[in-house]
Amino acid sequence: MVRAEGPLVLAQELARFAKQLEKINATLSGEAELRCMEPNLEIAIQCGSLGHVAAKIMITPDHMTQSHEFKFDLDQSYLGPLVIGCKGVLSRWPVRSQPSA
């Protein structure tokens, strides 16, 4: 088990990931990536031929001394609930507009 604490993901990063997940869920092709400004978490979900879905999660509590990578396959039916979960988080903590400089 790997546990990382603190603010790891910005709302706009999660919103971008959710949009990418919606696209691959609709087309069953392409990739969705959660790339965070904080170096503790990164997720990539890739749809290949015949609806094959592969996930890679990189997470660490200390990016200076550790790295942990998990790879596994998913059923394509998990994509829709994943989108719904992301949108649920965003409904509670929505993307805030940035003040213009």
Image: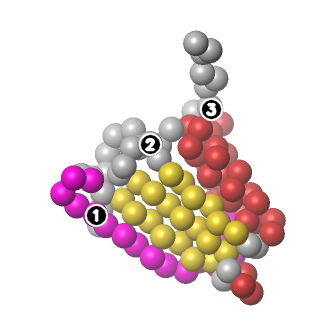
The local secondary structure at tag 3 comes to: loop
Three-letter amino acid code of the residue under disc 1: Ser
Q: Earlier in the sequence, mark 3 or mark 2?
A: 2
Q: Residues within 10 Å of mark 1 (few under 14, many from 20)?
A: some
Decide: is 40 above or below 49: above
Residue 10 is marked as none
> Which residue is found at the position 58% from the left and 46% from the top?
14
Residue 44 locus on image (x, y percent):
54, 64
Q: Which residues fall within the magenta stretch?
A: 63-79
Q: Residue furthest bottom?
A: 50
69 falls in the magenta region: yes
Q: Which mark is residue 67?
A: 1
Q: Which residue is denoted by mark 2 in the rendering? A: 37
Is residue 52 shown in magenta? Answer: no
Answer few, some or many: residues within 10 Å of disc 3's Cα (few below 14, many 20 plus, some between 14 and 19). Answer: some
In the picture shown, does residue 66 fall above or below 13?
below
Percent position of residue 87, x then y: 67, 46
Q: Amino acid at mark 3?
A: Pro
Left or right of residue 65, residue 90 in this image: right
* Lower position in the chain sequence, tag 1 or tag 3: 1
Q: Quadrant of residue 69?
A: bottom left
- Mark 3–mark 2 distance (CA, rounded to whole Å): 17 Å
**Residue 88 seen from this side:** no
Horizontal and vertical percent for residue 8? Answer: 41, 43
Circle nearer the viewer, 1 or 3: 1
Q: What residue is at 48 percent from the left and 70 percent from the top?
A: 56
Q: Extreme right residue here?
A: 26
Q: Which residue is mark 3?
A: 94
Q: Mark 1 near mark 3, Cβ–Cβ under 8 Å?
A: no
